[in-house]
Image: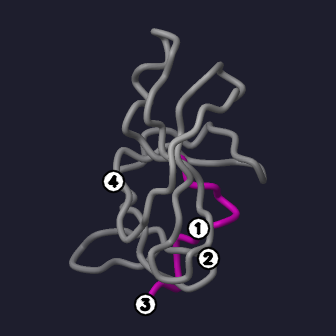
């Protein structure tokens, strides 16, 4: 994992844009469209698409796709609203798919 000013980073696997800090990982036990995914408290250099309701493994959520701000690849989604009380902790958080981010070779 590359360190910039002492920070360990995750980057877009397509263009190596810095998209998240290792310290912002909340959980590595999430499931994305293409396999494993990580839940982050924050994301960097991303754009957030339109909100829509999706039925996910943990119930109905309002989510918005998250795109790399440089190459526009879809990296995952942002939880905008959770309808079940037990899922409220996800609101405002980002799911980035492991297949779409890399921990090293960022520049």
Q: Looking at the image, is mark 4 or mark 3 earlier in the sequence? A: 4
Question: Disc 2 versus disc 4: distance between alpha carbons?
Answer: 19 Å
Per the rendered image, the range of residues in magenta is: 95-107
- What colour-coding does the image apply? one colour
- The label number, if any, that marks residue 107 in the structure image: 3
Residue at the bottom extreme of this rendering: 107
Q: Quadrant of the C terminus?
A: bottom left
Whether residues under marks 2 and 1 lie with C-beta atoms below 8 angstroms apart, the answer is: yes
Residue hosting label 1: 101
Whole-percent x, y for residue 83 in the image: 51, 16
**For residue 73, which quarter of the picture?**
bottom right
**For residue 75, which quarter of the picture?**
bottom right
Q: Is residue 43 left or right of residue 96?
A: left
Q: Looking at the image, is mark 2 or mark 4 earlier in the sequence? A: 2
Q: Looking at the image, is mark 3 or mark 1 earlier in the sequence? A: 1
Whole-percent x, y for residue 55 in the image: 70, 27
Question: Disc 2 versus disc 1: distance between alpha carbons?
Answer: 5 Å
Whether residues under marks 2 and 4 lie with C-beta atoms below 8 angstroms apart, the answer is: no
Assess disc 3: are there few (<14), some (14-19) or many (≥20) residues with their C-alpha within 10 Å of its C-alpha. few
Question: Disc 3 versus disc 2: distance between alpha carbons?
Answer: 12 Å
Quick one: SS at disc 3?
loop
Q: Is residue 4 left or right of residue 107?
A: left
Whole-percent x, y for residue 20 in the image: 40, 63
Q: Nearer the viewer, residue 83 or 100?
A: 83
Quick one: SS at disc 4?
helix
Q: Looking at the image, is mark 2 or mark 1 earlier in the sequence? A: 2
Quick one: SS at disc 1?
strand
Residue hosting label 2: 13
């Amino acid at each position: 994992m590359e360190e910039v000013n002492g920070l360990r980073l995750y980057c877009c696997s397509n263009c190596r844009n810095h998209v998240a800090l290792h310290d912002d990982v909340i959980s590595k036990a999430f499931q994305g469209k293409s396999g494993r995914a990580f839940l982050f408290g924050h994301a960097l250099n991303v754009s957030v698409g339109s909100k829509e309701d999706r039925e996910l493994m943990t119930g109905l959520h309002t989510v918005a796709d998250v795109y790399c701000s440089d190459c526009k690849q879809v990296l995952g989604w942002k939880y905008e609203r959770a309808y079940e009380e037990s899922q409220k902790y996800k609101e405002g958080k980002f799911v980035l798919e492991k297949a779409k981010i890399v921990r090293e070779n960022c520049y």
